[in-house]
Image (spheres, rainbow, N blue to C red):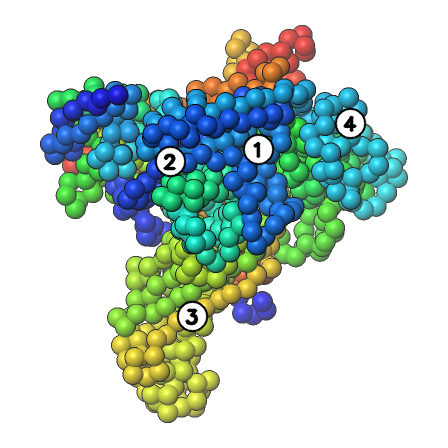
Amino acid sequence: MSKFHVSTTVNGDSVEYLCDPRETLLDCLRDKLNLTGAKEGCGTGDCGACSVSVDGRLVCSCLMLGVETDGKQIETVEGIADGDVLHPLQQKFIEHAALQCGICTPGILVAAKSLLEKNPNPTEEETRYWLAGNLCRCTGYDKIIRAVMETAEELREAS
Amino acid sequence: MALDDRKSEFTFVGTRPNRPDGLDKVTGRAKFGADMSAPGMLHGAILRSPHAHARIVKIDTSKAEAHKDVKAVVTRADFADVPFKPGLEGEFWNVLENVMAGEKALYDGHAVAAIAATSALAARDALKLIKVKYEVLPHVTDVDKAMASDAPVIREGAADYSVPEGMHPNVVRYHESGHGDVEAGFAEADLIIEDSFVTEATHQGYIEPHACLGMLGNDGKGELWCTTQGHWIAQKTCAALLGIETSQLRVTASEIGGGFGGKTTVFIEPVALALSRKANRPVKVVMTRSEVFRATGPTSSASMDIKIGMKKDGTISAAQGVFRLQGGAFPGAPGDMTAMCAFAPYNLTNVKQVGYDVMANRPKQAAYRAPGAPMGAFAVESVIDELCKKLELDPVDVRLKNAAYEGTKASYGPRYERIGLVETLEAAKAHPHYSAPLKPGQGRGISCGFWFNHGGETSVSLSLSEDGSAQLMVGTPDIGGSRASMALMAAEVLGIPYENIRVTIADTATLGYNDVSHGSRVTYASGLATIKAAKHAVEKLCERAAASWGIPTDAVKWENGCAVPSGPNAGDFDPRPLADITAHMGSTGGPISGHFEATPEGAGVSFGTHIVDAEVDPETGKTAITRYTVIQDAGKAIHPTYVEGQYQGGAAQGIGWALNEEYIYGEDGRLQNSIFLDYRIPVASDLPMIDTVIVEVPNPGHPFGVRGVGETGIVPPLAAIANAVSHAAGVRMRQLPMSPPRILAALKDNG
């Protein structure tokens, strides 16, 4: 089967790849661009470990085809930090031990960043429902929710 | 270890620094199992049985082998070739049989063949070219039915010596223990309750599917990268299954995306190596989520009968339990563990427990956090709760009255050393949660839980650098922040900053054997090993300082990171900091390292008490957990934040097990819910904040008092939640999970 040529932007960099029409955006990020930060936990859009943002919209990259991303702006966990300065969410996750094994962390950070961009002052309930599409099996979510809400508070105070 | 050797005042231990691998984990840089690749790499895929039980009549791989993208096809025949280790036995044979089916497919999802091809898509496509002829056999997936006289036999001759005569061949191990005279004890009781309970199988549910990258040459030398809780067991097992020497296979553990006991054995690793040997190229194999559910270790399912007698004052006069655990198509269900743990929190005069290990047509069970203990606790603690209710006694007071303490003869035999159960119960009673008012429709439950904890074979190596920093190599994969704990313990002994210690999970070629990261053993055993290795290095540092001062080594002590002259020489020389000694180590005797290789055996048993509030919606049968408090003895919390994390994670998994998670098999013996949409683990919006109380009753078997904390946290939740739900719903729940349909049915039966 012939492959398709895709030109897109990932974390601000222009990239091109050839992909089979059956390959997902996640496959393309991981296998063609060597951006292995997004993880495949389920392949069915249930776990959120592959969360990325496409043109500002939070998506499960396992549910989007690679060929669909031509001309789009993609942001992955690798692009969250500003150079060597971590995003406040990243810093807070480390300080609060909001991760144990860390496999869900890239997806949760991408999803949480998307939440704070849309809602800088989320309630606990709003935070829990926004992150309900991101499974974590280690933490019981307690420290994750606290880290996200505290980051939101600090960002509000700083702005 | 002598008690007077135990430290009780700390500089670094008990603080909460950032984990050493934090940056890697929040930036996507950390390399997990599926994140590795190699030049010339092929992709593997595995063909799995669609039948629960079937004889494999013929496998025709010719079309697949002829395909241009396919570079290797393997079946069981490719594992039988074991030139210098002919005839696998025991657990190695069981693992091989599970990794690749032999004469029969034993469960839905059992591997029967595998392919390596030039891309993942090509490998998946080529699986369709393999033709397997099956003769479908009768199957059984339920534990009680698997023990019945008319049940299909999974495998003749699988039972060991422990099984009494007359049992069905599917019963493969039997356990009986206890002490006293239960009949006499029941005769003394004012109230006896006898009841039966059922729990369904659940999956560990780690978010990272099994993944590996293997390379094996026809010279018998290989490399394996895999996500595992123990790379030495992976090394040993893969070598045995492939017929190569253990030392010729170097295994590197990737970062591990959760395990909980489910990554303590091998599944795809020997397959990747066999494919690689045939194709002479590296082969990567990554499981899909559905493969994880169908073919890797879930827990056992269980059927249990409990009988407990209680006096009016709350004293338990006798207790007995029968625990039947279904562990899939292989021996190994922890019927013995369930039996031994079930009554372990209590100081009982008369107790008897029986456990059965039963085979059925399901995937081979694997450990899941305190394997076997949660089910037994659910049954026993439910009956105790019912006794308290009927006798109008406070459930914490009754547990305090019967609680085990130092010197108690445990239900499973030995006498306890210093333990912290009473302290957790007292903390529960004093906690504001226990006396907080409940709203209508809510119920409160409590439960105690016990787990043995484990030591295990352990090797650690610590080397000092010229600049005074330290490299620490441990062999237990870091699943939840253990590198931070190791660095804290090393810093405590060396007296150098936490940040100056780099902790690495060494590969199998770099360090001696290490048992798996299981049994809550990492902070205990690798921690003890780290302390000893650091002390070993400190001895050498003191020797160098003594030599430079011209005084005996025993006249030097180590204080705050410095060699200090002591005794008659005190004050004669300026203290020499660690970095001052290491700066000159090349010219004063050479490199300075410390080592530890042994099997620590003082793990120290662990207890916890949980309090939970549940609210049941009588219209939908849905349960909400409205408040949760975990109280557990950690001995000594090295990094309290990660201890809290273990408590919270165990509780969350317990909530899933109690309320929603279960393996659902159809009449055809096929698993019906093999994706996360249908096997729903708790999500953020399902849970409340989970409060924690860290009780610290030092373990006499560890220099800093550590008890493992990883597993005990999943033991009380099933029972605590069942008790809360039973109070909220006004009807005793005897089957898990307490899913909305089951609760509605129970409410209906209750009128």
Contact between marks 1 and 2 (CB within 8 A): the answer is no
Q: Secondary structure at mark 1?
A: loop
The residues tagged by marks 2 and 4 sit, at their Cα atoms, a distance apart of: 61 Å
Residue B422: x, y in percent? 63, 47
Residue B101 circle label: 1
- Label 3 and label 2: CA atoms lie apart by 47 Å
Q: Mark 3 against mark 1, which lies toward the viewer?
A: 1
Q: Residues within 10 Å of mark 1 (few under 14, many from 20)?
A: many
Instruction: Work out whether mark 1 precedes mark 2 in sequence or the reverse, and give the earlier one.
Output: 2
Q: Is residue B287 visible?
A: no
Name the subunit of mark 4.
Answer: B
* Cβ atoms under marks 1 and 4 closer than 8 Å: no
Residue A74 locus on image (x, y percent): 18, 27
Kind of residue indicated by mark 3: Gly
Labels 2 and 4 within one chain? yes
Q: Earlier in the sequence, mark 3 or mark 1?
A: 1
- Which residue carries the number 3 mark? B594
Q: Which residue is mark 2?
A: B71
- Residue beneath disc 4: B194
Question: Alpha-carbon distance for marks 3 and 4?
Answer: 56 Å
Marks 1 and 4: which is nearer the front? 1
Nearer to us: label 2 or label 4: 2
> Which residue type carries mark 1?
Ala
For the point 48% across and 58% down, the residue is B247
